[in-house]
Image (cartoon, rainbow, N blue to C red):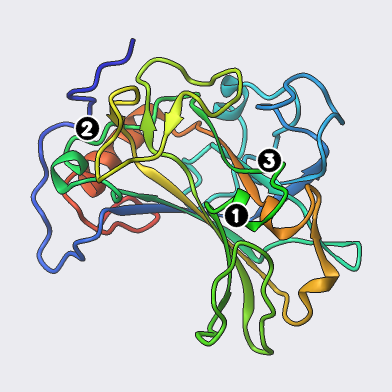
């Protein structure tokens, strides 16, 4: 069992002068490849999934292991992030359209400041799925949100939205960040993780880890009726994360950015 205290990262760092007081670090990971594979939901079963678009690690397929990720190339900034991220492919008029980039924010939020200070590094090999690929309507997947970049007059929705010329279609997805402290995955790929309730983690999932926020920006405007995901309508948006940050680097960023509530860049520094 993994402990809920300590967790590496060294002594409490000094808050740099002028630091933005937001608990955050990030990885900017462009699209790498498409495959009908899912090494979390359908491990070792190539072609068993709907089409996915992959980001970060350049080698992810149905049989990917954490050791393979650690020893493979990543197109992330920073390149030290060897994790794999994937989403259902978006189609417009049945032609795949990939995001201009995938931005993955690691945040300290949703819990009290006291609990943010106790945030533990995401354990190596942790697998998390967020969203609902089997949603039958927008209210089945309230975690996923669609909006338009640079178009404040368009209200966010759980389904696709109509973005005006000059804007870009955006997808936001927040992953759960309360961990049971034991399991790197679970049979349904969700039960080992939970969302906070009342600014605290439930007793069943007592370990606070950074919250992953996935932001995708697509070069798409106009009629959302032409759009679909490989999993179905816009409200079936979901994301998968397979953590392969080197242990020391994850611990440093949690210590230097999240616990002291400082906004860091891709280099993990304020």
Which quarter of the rendered picture does the C terminus lie within?
Answer: bottom left
For label 2, the residue is 9
**Residue furthest to the right:** 94
Q: Residues within 10 Å of mark 1 (few under 14, many from 20)?
A: few
Q: Residue 139 carries which label?
A: 1
Q: Is residue 186 above or below residue 81?
A: above
What is the CA distance from the residue labelled 1 to the residue labelled 2?
40 Å
Q: Residue 213 carries which label?
A: none
Q: Which residue is drawn at 45% across and 34% down?
A: 245
Q: Which mark is residue 58?
A: 3
* Numbered disc 1: secondary structure: helix
149 horizontally vs 137: left or right: left
Compare marks 2 and 3 and give the one earlier in the sequence: 2
Q: Which one is in front, 193 or 253? A: 193
193 horizontally vs 130: left or right: left
What is the CA distance from the residue labelled 2 to the residue labelled 3?
28 Å
For the residues bearing labels 1 and 2, Cβ distance under 8 angstroms: no
What is the CA distance from the residue labelled 1 to the residue labelled 3?
34 Å
Q: Return the x and y of residue 258 as percentages of the image width and height.
A: 25, 46
Compare marks 1 and 2 and give the one earlier in the sequence: 2
Which quarter of the rendered picture does the N terminus lie within?
Answer: top left
Q: Return the x and y of residue 84 as percentages of the image width and height.
A: 60, 38
- Quarter where residue 206 is shown: top left
Q: Return the x and y of residue 200 as percentages of the image width and height.
A: 25, 39
* Numbered disc 2: secondary structure: loop
Q: Which residue is drawn at 69% across and 89% down?
A: 165
Q: Which one is in front, 26 or 224? A: 224
Q: Residues within 10 Å of mark 2 (few under 14, many from 20)?
A: some
Q: Residue at x 25, y 36 (%)?
A: 119
């Amino acid at each position: 069992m993994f402990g809920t205290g300590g967790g590496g990262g060294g002594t409490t760092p000094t808050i740099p002068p002028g630091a933005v007081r937001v608990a955050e670090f990030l990885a900017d990971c462009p699209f790498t490849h498409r495959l009908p594979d899912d090494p979390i939901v359908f491990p070792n079963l190539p072609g068993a999934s709907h089409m996915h678009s992959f980001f970060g690690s350049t080698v992810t397929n149905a049989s990917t292991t954490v050791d393979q990720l650690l020893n493979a190339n990543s197109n992330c900034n920073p390149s030290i992030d060897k994790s794999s991220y994937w989403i259902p492919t978006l189609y417009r008029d049945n032609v795949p359209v990939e995001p201009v980039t995938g931005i993955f924010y690691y945040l300290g939020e949703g819990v009290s400041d006291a609990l943010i200070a106790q945030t533990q590094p995401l354990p190596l090999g942790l697998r998390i799925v967020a969203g609902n690929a089997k949603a039958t309507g927008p209210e089945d997947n309230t975690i996923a949100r669609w909006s338009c970049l640079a178009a404040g007059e368009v209200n966010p929705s759980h389904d696709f939205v109509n973005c005006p010329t000059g804007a870009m279609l955006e997808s936001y997805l927040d992953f759960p960040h309360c961990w049971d402290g034991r399991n790197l995955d679970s049979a349904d790929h969700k039960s080992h993780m939970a969302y906070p309730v009342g600014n605290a983690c439930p007793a069943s999932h007592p370990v606070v880890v950074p919250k992953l926020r996935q932001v995708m920006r697509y070069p798409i405007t106009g009629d959302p009726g032409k759009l679909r995901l490989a999993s179905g309508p816009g409200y079936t948006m979901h994301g998968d994360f397979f953590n392969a940050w080197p242990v020391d680097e994850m611990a440093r960023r949690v210590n230097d950015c999240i616990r002291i509530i400082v906004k860091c860049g891709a280099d993990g520094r304020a």
